Image: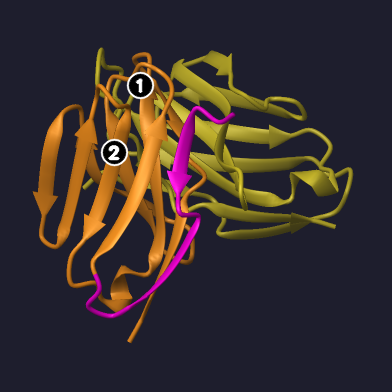
Chain colours: A yellow, B orange
Amino acid sequence: DVKVTQSSRYLVKRTGEKVFLECVQDMDHENMFWYRQDPGLGLRLIYFSYDVKMKEKGDIPEGYSVSREKKERFSLILESASTNQTSMYLCASSFLQKTYNEQFFGPGTRLTVL
Amino acid sequence: KNEVEQSPQNLTAQEGEFITINCSYSVGISALHWLQQHPGGGIVSLFMLSSGKKKHGRLIATINIQEKHSSLHITASHPRDSAVYICAVGKGAQKLVFGQGTRLTINP
């Protein structure tokens, strides 16, 4: 079975803190994604990586950065957390493919910024 | 306007009822996905389709490419079907665009 794991299920941080969210997949997928999910807005893409050290901005990259030093690991960094970054964060991975785009999701991290 | 629109946003039904969730999209797609998210967050893929119809147990997904519309049906609904159902379309080769989700509650 494909497994995508995230470092925390729940996280509480203070405004201004630097926050690291980690994602690891065990299926040798080329693509990895970070999304945030908010009520009424659905999943929105923050960043996408299609290879080690490669990244591409998604729809809402402001306030976030990412790191992909190894193929299996994709980190999301909140440089200075703010209350409007309180959300559910979901990581996903998929093969690099020409047509279909099936993605496999981690369990999510619910981040609260106080 | 969102590229992927789902309706209804919330749906409450009694156990045993036939359920339909709709998805309309406005972009050219490579495939359409139906996903399920239970309380607690994890998302699983139910269907991936690019034409016609697929069936898995009590779940049926259909897509009409010309009308840019898909439906997810649940027959003989059960309380364990209570979840958020998400429609997503493949945009280009690698990315997905998601609908807002439909929160389904099945009462016993």
Residue A9 figure quarter: bottom right
What is the magenta range? B1-17
What is the number of the mark on residue A30? 1
Q: Residue at x 49, y 40 (%)?
A: A91
What is the number of the mark on residue B70? 2
Residue B26 in magenta?
Answer: no
Q: Amino acid at mark 1?
A: Glu
Residue A108 point in image, percent of width and height: 51, 52
Horizontal placement of B79 versus B47: left or right? right
Q: Looking at the image, which is closer to me, B84 or B12? A: B12
Residue B43 point in image, percent of width and height: 39, 51
Residue A60 figure quarter: top right
Which element type, helix, strand or loop, lies under badge 2? strand
**Category of crowding for the residue at label 1, using alpha-carbon neighbours closer than 10 angstroms: few (below 14), some (14–19), many (at least 20):** some
Horizontal placement of B42 versus A28: left or right? right
Which element type, helix, strand or loop, lies under badge 1? loop
Q: Residue at x 47, y 66 (%)?
A: B39
The mark closer to the camera, 2 or 1, is: 2
Q: Amino acid at mark 2?
A: Ser
Q: Residue at x 74, y 51 (%)?
A: A86
Q: Looking at the image, which is closer to me, A68 or A40? A: A40
